[in-house]
Amino acid sequence: PVEAAKKVAGEVADAVHDAVSMTGPVPGAPGSEPPTLEEPTEPREVPPPKPDQQQPTPLSPTGAPSADPPTASAQQGAYLTTATGVRIGDSDHSLKAGPRGPTLLSDHHLREKIMHFDHERIPERVVHARGAGAHGVFRSNGAASKVSRAAVFADGEETRVFVRFSTVLGSRGSADTVRDTRGFATKFYTREGNWDLVGNNIPVFFIQDGIKFPDVIHAGKPHPDREIPQAQSAHDTFWDFVSLHTEAQHHAIWNMSDRGIPRSYRMMEGFGVHTFRLVDAEGGTTLVKFHWKPRLGVHSLTWEEAQLAGGVDPDFHRRDLYDAIESGAFPEWDLGIQAFPDTPDQMFEGIDLLDATKLVPEELAPVQVIGTLTLNGNPTNFFAETEQVAFHTGHLVPGIDGTDDPLLAARNFSYLDTQLTRLAGPNFNQIPINRPHAPVNDNHRDGYHQHAVHGGVAPYKPNTLDAGCPFFAGAEEGAFVDVPVEVQGSKVRENPASYDDHFSQARLFWKSMSPVEQQHIVHAYTFELGKCYEQAVKERQLLALANIDAGLCSQVARGLGLPAPERSVQYDEPEPSPALSQVGGTWPTDGRIVGIVVDPDGDLAGVAEARESLMAQGLLPLLVAPRGGELGEGLVAQRTFATARSVEFDALVVAGAAPPAADALPARDAKAGDDSAVASDPRVGLLLTEAYRHDKAILAFGEGRQVLVELGIDGAGVTSGDAAGDVVDDLVTLLGSHRVWERSAALG
Ligand code: HDE
C-alpha cells in the first residue's frame, strides 16, 4: 500500500504540474478578452480563474487527489457583495438618519469598506521596494542536464516563471531611471517545486559577508535625519561607507558606469552573483555562476536621459516592460552558466569563487547557454502578484544547491525572515503567486492567514494515525538530497586572505570599458562626489580611485577641484575583459521606439509608408504631431508636441514637414498648437537637439530635411532621403549599435 500510495503521489505530481502550470494562456497575453470600455448593465459571468488564481488540486492526507474542484480566490458571481457574500444594492451612500442627518453606526457595509481600505497597504520591501513583474516561460535546451539532475534543465522542459525587476534603494513610489543596481529575481515553478534565482544586473556585490548588509544599506538609504536623497547614492553616507569599506569599490564602479542606468529592463543582463553547486544524477557536482543574457543586448540611458525620464516619466522602465509585452514584443533572455570544477579550494584561475565581490571574466570561462526565458504575460493585478511575490535564495530544487559563500548564507536567513513582517505571517507560500506548481504536503499547520483546510489528525512524523502519511521520498522519488560536503575549521570571525584584494577587479572593469564608457564613469563619480558635503569623504574616495586608475582619479579630482592622490595599494595588473563593454556590437532592434515627427499638412502618404516599413522591421513607430486626433490618410497622432519628450524615443524621423515660410516667426515666438509651424515649433527643436545630444539616430525625408538644416543637425548618425523608403534601412542599421557612438566620441 505504501508503494501504491507513492505511485499515486507521483502521478498526481505530474497531473498537477500539467494542469496548473502549462495550460491556458499566460495571464494578460494577447488573445485574452479585450477590456470593455463601459461598465456592463447586465450581470455577466466572470471570467474563469487564471492559472495563478487556481489552487493546485488539494491532496488528501494520503496523497490521493481530492474531489474538490479548484476554486477561484476572488470575483465569484456577477454581483457586488460584502466580504461575507451578501449582495449589495448601494455602495455610494452611507446609511444616515435622513439625507442630511448623522451617519448610523449600524451601517456594516460602510464600516467594512472603510476598515478594509484602511489596511490596504503593507510594508514595502526593506530593499528593492520598487519593482515591475511579468509572467513567462523558461525553455531548457538540455545542455545543463549533463551537470544537473534538476527537471527544469531537462531537454525541452518548459517551466512557467514569474520575474520581478527592481531598483534597490528607492521606496515603492520612487523613479525608475535612478542610478542604482537593478534586481532581477526569477521564480521558476518547476515540477519539483519552486526554484528562485534572486539576482541583480551587476555580477558582484558591495560586501563579502552578509553581516555587513545592514551597514551598506543604511549608508545607501536616505540620510536618517532628513530622509533625503531618495533612490540614489549621490550623498555623503554612501560614499563615507564605500570609501572606508573598500571591498565595495568594485560594485561601486559598476554603479557609476552605464550599467547603473539601464535603457530598459529588457536590455539588462542578470547575474546570480554567488557561485552555486549543480548536482548530477550520480551525485557529481559542478560549481556554476548563472548569467541572463538579453537577446536585445545590454543598453543604457545617458545620464541626462535618465534624469529627464525621472521627471517626465518616473515609470519609464515599468511602462516599457508592460508596453513591450502588451504589444507582443516579448522580451527574451538566454540563461547561461559558467562552469568550474568543484575543487576543495573553490578557486578558479586565482579567483575565489566564494567571494561575491569578484567575477570570472567570460574570456576565462565562457557562458554556456542552457535555456531561454520569454516574458509573455503582464500581471493581472500588481499587488497580488508583483507586490506579494516572495523570493528566497533557499528555494532550491534537487540538482541545484548553494555554496558556503558567507553572503549567500545570510541571504538564506534573511529572505524567509523578511516575509514575516512584509506578508504578515508564515503562510505566504499559500498566496497564489507564490504557490508551487507541484503538490504540497508539508505538515506545517495553522498560523496567520492559513488558507488550507488540512485533513487528518497527525501532522507529525512518524505517525500511524494518518497511515504514516505523508511519506519521505528517496532520491529516486525526487527528494532533495544535501550534498555531503566536508566541513572543518575553528569558529572564527575572519575572512580568508584572498578576500583582501579590493581593487584589481575594479581596475579590470575600468580597463575593459571603451573611451566613451570611461567618460561616463568619470562624469558619474564627479557628479556623485560633487553632491557630497564632507571634504574628507571626497578625499578618501579619491584615494580609492587612485588605486583603480590614475587617469580616472585625476579627471574626477579636477572636476572636484581637489588634488589627485597617489596610488597606495599594489596588485598584479589585470587583463581587460572585452565582454564587459556595451559598445561595439550590433543587436536586434525589435521593439525599439521611433518617433515620427509629422506635419499634418505635409507628406502623409510618406509617413504612412515609413510607419509600415518600420513596423515590418519589428520597430514601434509613434506619430508625434502638433495636435492629437486624426491626421488624415488613416493616421492618428500617438503623441503631441505637448506630450512627447525625446527620452521616449530610440530614434527620430522628421517626415515631410512643410518648410517654414520665408517670413517664418523666430522659434521663440512660435505658438504651441499652431499646426502650420512644425519646423519652427520650439518643441520640435528641443526634441531633435536632445536626441542629437543623446547620440540617437535622426533621419529626415522629403521636406522634413529642411527642419534639420534649420536646426543645424548634421554629421554621424544623421541621414536623409527623398522618400521614406530611402531612410528606413539606414535607421535599422544605426539602431543596431544602440547609439551613434562616434558622435559622443567627437563631442568628448
Ligand atoms: Fe537581497 N534582499 N539581500 N540581494 N535582494 C531582499 O528580500 C539581502 C543581495 C535581491 O523582487 C529582501 O523579499 C541580504 C544580493 C533582489 O522581491 C531581503 C543580503 C543580491 C531582491 C534581502 C542581500 C540580492 C532582494 C527584501 C546580503 C543579488 C528583490 C525583500 C547578505 C544576487 C526580490 C525581500 C524581489 C530583496 C536581503 C544581498 C538581490 C531583506 C541580507 C547579493 C533581486 O530579504
Image (cartoon, grey):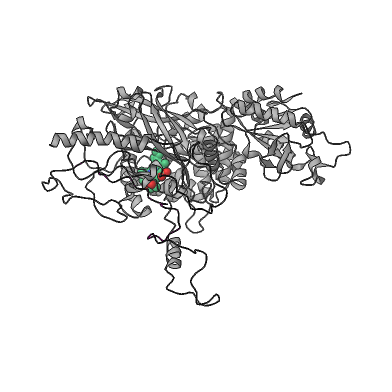
- Which residue of the protein is positioned furthest toward the left in this rendering? 464
Q: How many numbered tags mark residues here?
A: 0
Quarter location, residue 439 = top left
In the picture, the quarter occupied by the C terminus is: top right
Residue closer to the observer: 85 or 718: 85
Q: Quadrant of ligand 1?
A: top left
Does any portion of residue 554 appear in the rendered image? no
- Which residue of the protein is positioned furthest toward the front in this rendering? 42
Q: Position of residue 15 (x, y in %)?
A: 29, 35
In the rendered view, would you say 172 is above or below 323? Answer: below
Residue closer to the observer: 233 or 546: 233
Whether the magenta-drawn stretch holds residue 74 is answered as yes
Side of 239 relative to 282 (left or right): right
Side of 93 relative to 599 (left or right): left
Q: Position of residue 43 (x, y in %)?
A: 48, 53
In the picture, the quarter occupied by the N terminus is: top left
Residue closer to the observer: 213 or 634: 634
Does any portion of residue 620 appear in the rendered image? yes
Whether the magenta-drawn stretch holds residue 592 is answered as no
Q: Position of residue 123 (x, y in %)?
A: 42, 55
Q: Position of residue 475 (x, y in %)?
A: 20, 31
Q: Which secondary structure is most common in the magenta stretch?
A: loop
Residues drawn in magenta: 62-85
